Structures are given as structure tokens and as C-alpha cells.
Amino acid sequence: MKVITNEKLVKRQAAIGKWASLIGMGALLGGLVVSYRWPNQLTASFGCLIVGFMLASVGTYNMNRWVKEPRADQTLTKALKGFDNKHSLYHYTLPAAHVLLAPSGLFVFTVKDHHGEVRCEGEKWHHKFHWGRLLLFFGQEGLGNPTREVRGGIGRLGRFLDGKLPEADVPIEGLIVFTNPRARLELIDPVVPVVSSNKLKTFLRQRKKNRISAEQRKELAEIFEEA
């Protein structure tokens, strides 16, 4: 399997996370110093604290997503290891973050690293509250609506292909992948397939084969590598 990752984007976002964390912590410390040394300077103190808090939150979010390993791209690559050279996996190079080009079609992945009880009924999602989430509230991405996210990725990729291959009818499917082994999934008729990363390869192997010809795969691969 060929894997293409936008390493420049990963490094840039990781650097933003590190610097935002450092500057944010500095601003928080500055706000505390101002409030202690000059208690009448409330505006300056609160300004430093608010800016510091926001920067620290952005930094923590980026650190969790782009620095902490395994990242989403690394987990997907490991989960799909062993596929032959008819498969190409693209991370952060296309309008959708994670895309697999395979004989059975194009697959757009939305990746979630959340743990705990996660419930999906149709296209509605619920992540059960626990106190550990409260500690990570600032900096960790909320669950949101993975169904809406993956549909957005499919739409963006579809529009991209319409501009490049307007006559082609390329099948695009979405998959929601949970990578945390501590995630406990309750799935009730999800409108988009939901799988754990350790079952992803098995799921894909069960899909209908040869929906995209070798010639079309080659054409798509050339377009994707130029993106």
C-alpha cells in the first residue's frame, strides 16, 4: 500500500501547538504576576489571563492532534498495513483529511480518538459525560457529529473530482473510525458505517471488489498526487 502524508502540514501544526502552549503559559503567568504586583490593574491582568487561556487551549488542542502519537494518520496507516499496491492512502493532501483509493472505491475516513461510552442512533451522537472529560475540556476536540463530518469530507472530495473528472462516476463512501481501544460503541442503525480501527481492514475487505478499474485508479492517483 502506498501512503502519502502531508508532512509539512503536520510539522507546521505541531510547531503552532508548541509555540501557542509556551506563549499561552507565559501569558497566564504574566497575568498572575500583574494581579499580584499591581492588584489595581484588573484590565491588564484579565487581558493576560484570557489571552493566555485561549492560546494554551489552542496549543493543547494542536499538541493532542499533531504531536501526541499515535496520530490519526499513523493509526490508520497501521490499521491498513498489509494491503497491496492497488491501494493508496492519502493523509492531509486532499479536500478530505484521510482518503483511501482502492479497487472497491474511494473511502473518506473521519477518525475519532475518544474513549468512554459513545452512542450513535441513525445520525445522532451522544458521548456520555465523565469527570475525566471535564479535565480535558479545554484542548481536546469534542466528539461533535462524526456523521456530518464524514459527509462534509465526501462532499468536498466529490466537488474536487467533479472539477477534475466531470464525466467520471467514482464511488465514494464514508467511514467513521474509532481508534481508542477504551471506546465503547453503541450503534443503532448508523447511516454511515462505524468501525473500530482494529476491525477496519476486515470491513474494507468485505466490500465489493473492482468498482474502480486499474486505468481509473491510475488516473485518480495522478490527480491526487498533483493536488
Image: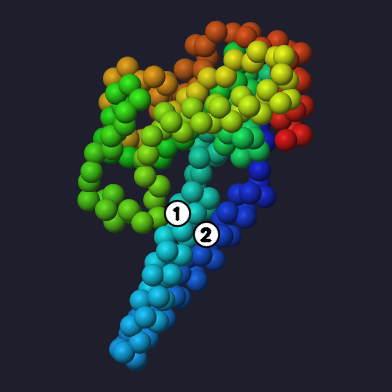
Residue 153 shown left or right of residue 226 in the figure: left
Which residue lies at the image location 32% right of the left edge and 17% below the top edge? Answer: 189
Please tell me in which quadrant of the rendered image residue 97 appears.
Answer: top right
Look at the numbered discs 2 and 1 and tell me whether their residues touch, using CB distance below 8 Å.
yes
Which residue lies at the image location 74% right of the left edge and 25% below the top edge? Answer: 164
Residue 117 shown left or right of residue 93 in the figure: left
- Residue identifier under label 1: 61
Q: Secondary structure at mark 2?
A: helix
The N terminus sits in image quarter: top right
Q: Label 1: how many residues lie within 10 Å, few (<14), some (14-19) or many (20+)?
A: many
Q: Earlier along the polypeptide chain: callout 2 or callout 1?
A: 2
Which residue lies at the image location 56% right of the left edge and 60% below the top edge? Answer: 16
Residue 114 appears at what percent x and percent y?
36, 40
Residue 7 appears at what percent x and percent y?
66, 47
Q: Amino acid at mark 2?
A: Gly
- Residue identifier under label 2: 17
Q: Nearer the viewer, residue 85 or 46?
A: 46
Which residue lies at the image location 72% right of the left edge and 14% below the top edge? Answer: 167
Residue 192 shown left or right of residue 220 in the figure: left
Callout count: 2
Residue 56, relative to residue 98: is it above or below? below
Q: Amino acid at mark 1?
A: Tyr
Please tell me in which quadrant of the rendered image residue 33 appears.
Answer: bottom left
For the residues labelled 2 and 1, the Cα–Cα distance comes to: 7 Å
Q: Residue furthest bottom?
A: 37
Asked if residue 177 can be seen in this view, the reply is: no
Please tell me in which quadrant of the rendered image residue 146 appears.
Answer: top left
